[in-house]
């Protein structure tokens, strides 16, 4: 594919955004940018420093000083996440980070810093970027916008399996409640809330396998090149 498209994939937690975006990027020879990992990195840093997560000024300053780099890896399901020179790829997926990332991500100063970084990363095109506000806020002129969703039960099941695979115990009812709470925080935040862009294509992945979703997006990309 010669045209350097920007593909924005948005949706709530557990809808399959990261997996789908990574495969689509690999198939097209594009760069994959996991914006959620960036907010998780800031959250991890704040937790390490025992920071008051209610102090927006401190969190904004932290985000401004944090050096975050994403490195795509051949054959890996997720990019390597480097935080101030340290590989934190696994640590940012911990239950503790997951519980607090929505609170950190809604801080205006944090979002400002991360969005600026995301736009710099994707300005040349030829990228697949997933998150919650890519098609509405980060790249509102993206050539392709996809909004992935799934039932809360299916999303909790997927997230729980991920945690179990990493050795974390899973309280299924608590996990479902945490996902519902994050959905609400993402949808109600003042800046760049989680909403479907008017021109985004809605794909419900509850009963769709990954391959089917990927094929659909690739077909769309080929049709507009």
Image (spheres, rainbow, N blue to C red):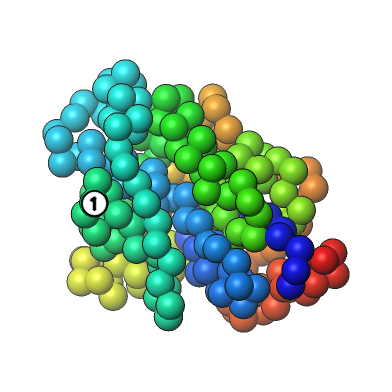
68 lies above or below 89: above
- In the displayed image of the protein, which residue is found farthest to the right? 223
154 lies above or below 69: below
Classify mark 1: helix, strand or loop: loop
Residue that numbered label 1 is attached to:
85
- In the rendered image, which quarter is residue 208 located in? bottom right
- In the rendered image, which quarter is residue 119 located in? top right
Residues 216 and 171: in front is: 216
126 lies above or below 121: below
Which residue is located at x 26 percent, y 63 percent? 90
Residue 205: image x %, image y %? 62, 68
Left or right, 71 with reference to 163? right
The quarter of the picture where the C terminus appears is bottom right
Residues 37 and 210: in front is: 37
Which residue is located at x 74 percent, y 72 percent? 1
Which residue is located at x 80 percent, y 72 percent? 222
Residue 210: image x %, image y %? 58, 76
Res. 45 visible in picture? yes
169 lies above or below 42: below
Residue 116: image x %, image y %? 51, 35
Which residue is located at x 35 percent, y 30 percent? 64
How many numbered markers are drawn? Answer: 1
Left or right, 193 with reference to 104? right
Left or right, 141 with reference to 88? right
Residues 225 and 34: in front is: 225
Q: Residues within 10 Å of mark 1 (few under 14, many from 20)?
A: few
Residue 156: image x %, image y %? 43, 62
Res. 171 visible in picture? no
């Amino acid at each position: 594919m010669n045209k350097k498209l920007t593909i924005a994939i948005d949706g709530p937690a557990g809808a399959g955004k990261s997996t789908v975006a990574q495969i689509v990027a690999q198939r097209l020879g594009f760069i994959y940018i996991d914006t959620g990992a960036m907010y998780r990195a800031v959250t991890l840093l704040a937790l390490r420093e025992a920071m008051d997560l209610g102090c927006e000024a401190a969190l904004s300053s932290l985000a401004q000083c944090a050096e975050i780099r994403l490195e795509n890896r051949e054959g890996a399901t997720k990019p390597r996440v480097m935080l101030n020179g340290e590989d934190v790829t696994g640590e940012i997926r911990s239950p503790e980070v997951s519980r607090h990332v929505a609170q950190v991500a809604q801080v205006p100063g944090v979002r400002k810093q991360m969005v600026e970084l995301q736009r710099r990363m994707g300005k040349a095109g030829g990228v697949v970027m997933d998150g919650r506000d890519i098609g509405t806020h980060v790249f509102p002129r993206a050539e392709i916008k996809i909004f992935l969703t799934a039932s809360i039960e299916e999303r909790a099941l997927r997230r729980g399996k991920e945690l179990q695979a990493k050795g974390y115990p899973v309280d299924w009812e608590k996990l479902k409640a945490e996902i519902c709470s994050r959905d609400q925080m993402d949808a109600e935040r003042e800046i760049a809330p989680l909403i479907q862009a008017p021109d985004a294509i809605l794909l419900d992945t509850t009963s769709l396998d990954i391959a089917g979703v990927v094929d659909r997006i690739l077909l769309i990309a080929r049709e507009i090149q």
